[in-house]
Image: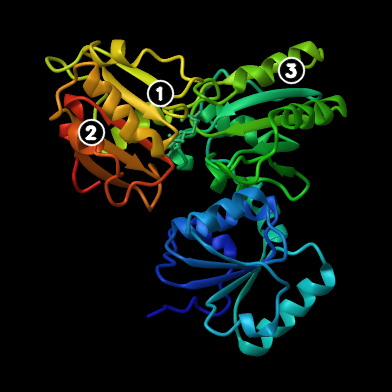
Amino acid sequence: MSRRVPQGHELGELGVAVAYDGVRVLVVGGPARALGVVTRLIQRGARVDVVAPEVATSVQDLAERAVLAWTARDYCADDLPGAGLVVIACHDPAQSALVRADCARLGIPTADVTAELSNGAATDETGDQQTTVVQPRPGSVVLVGGGPGDPGLLTVAGLAAIRAAEVVVVDRLAPLEVLRELGSDVQVVDVAKIPRGRFTPQEQINEVLLEHARAGRRVVRLKGGDSFVFGRGMEEVIACREAGIEVAVIPGVTSAVAAPELAGIPVTHRGLVQGFAVVSGHAAPDDPRSTVDWAALASSGLTIVILMGVETLPRIAAALLVGGRPTATPVACVMDAAGPRQRTVRTDLGALAQGTLPQGIAPPAVTVVGEVAALVDVAS
Ligand code: SAH
């Protein structure tokens, strides 16, 4: 049963603890600028339906992962029944006016993304925090590691840099909710890469950064986790340096450590394991592109943390068994960490090597192989 949002409700209230459990929210339009509000609503339990002929890559990614529903066509009045709130995020003022009028007739509260975004910019929760902030200067680029997805896991310095930005260039796994804070004059560029799907090539991302910096803007490049952990951050730093553009990096909380931790798994634990290795699972052990010595990893005695490439996990498990890891070695797969959809699947190396992925494993996921995986908090 869906709870209706009270009349007169303003999206600004999203800043405080308003629950949207089960409320259907219709979003008309799907630009990158709407990502902050949309992800915030999802976080608060809303069922989000986006209607727009075209959407930003990260909106499409959320649709493909069934986090929201996207109907690829223009808005029509038939979309409204059942909506508890309508978010207007379309470019065309005439269409915005039409949606607003239709909603008024049916008594459905509306929220305009542009208005909301400019209000949000006035708030400053970190004003009196002490930090050696790397502030983006005109004509410079600051890479911000955004943590695993919850804005609460963004650093104080990272948030300050975002608030000072004139252009924010984002990835799909970045803490997108924080984009709500931006003033309406701030440009959001979505350069997400959907695995095996729609993506912006790295060279083009570099070019976007350089182009805005050359135009004298304060550019923030917001990524998920830490920019230098499988984040291609150094490529962007090099591109800036080669172009003579000032560039700085603010470290982030990497999902390699945070995802296991949020599921109750310590990557090291005194008496159990003395270290951990973080590896990409993108190229399977039998893939000629793989340069990882899986046999050495198997016998290293370290916790193995695997990012990316969920479908390669059975082949990785098989290689680790060949390398001598016992079949009973605990494995935990932590998916969508730091969000409302976070869940964990617990298995072992022997079962994983069987060839088919255990039920329920889907990207994005961080997989932990080692005794510490048995410490998983099953409720997580
Ligand atoms: N720079 C990022 C990693 C980028 S590679 C970092 O430091 O976290 C992308 C991979 O990170 C995903 O395939 C997945 O393995 C992992 N990942 C990132 N965010 C995640 C999340 N919220 N939950 C689970 N895995 C995540």
Q: Relative to 140, is 289 on the left or the right? A: left
Contact between marks 3 and 1 (CB within 8 A): the answer is no
Dot 3 or dot 1, earlier in sequence = 3
Q: Residue at x 79, y 62 (%)?
A: 91
Q: In the picture shown, does residue 250 fall above or below 310?
A: above
Q: Relative to 352, is 207 on the left or the right? A: right
Q: Which residue is mark 2?
A: 331
Report x, y in % for residue 17: 43, 59
Q: Which residue is mark 1?
A: 286
Q: Mark yes or no: residue 251 visible.
A: yes
Report x, y in % for residue 133: 59, 21
Residue 227 sits in quarter: top right
| Residue 82 numbered tag | none
What residue type is disc 3 on?
Ala
Q: Which residue is mark 3?
A: 239
Q: Secondary structure at mark 1?
A: loop
What residue type is disc 2 on?
Val
Q: Residue at x 66, y 18 (%)?
A: 235
Report x, y in % for residue 269: 19, 20
Dot 2 or dot 3, earlier in sequence = 3
Picture mark count: 3
Question: How far is the residue under mark 3 from the one under mark 1?
Answer: 32 Å
Report x, y in % for residue 316: 33, 27
Frontmost of labels 3 and 1 is 1
Front residue (pair 39, 165)? 39
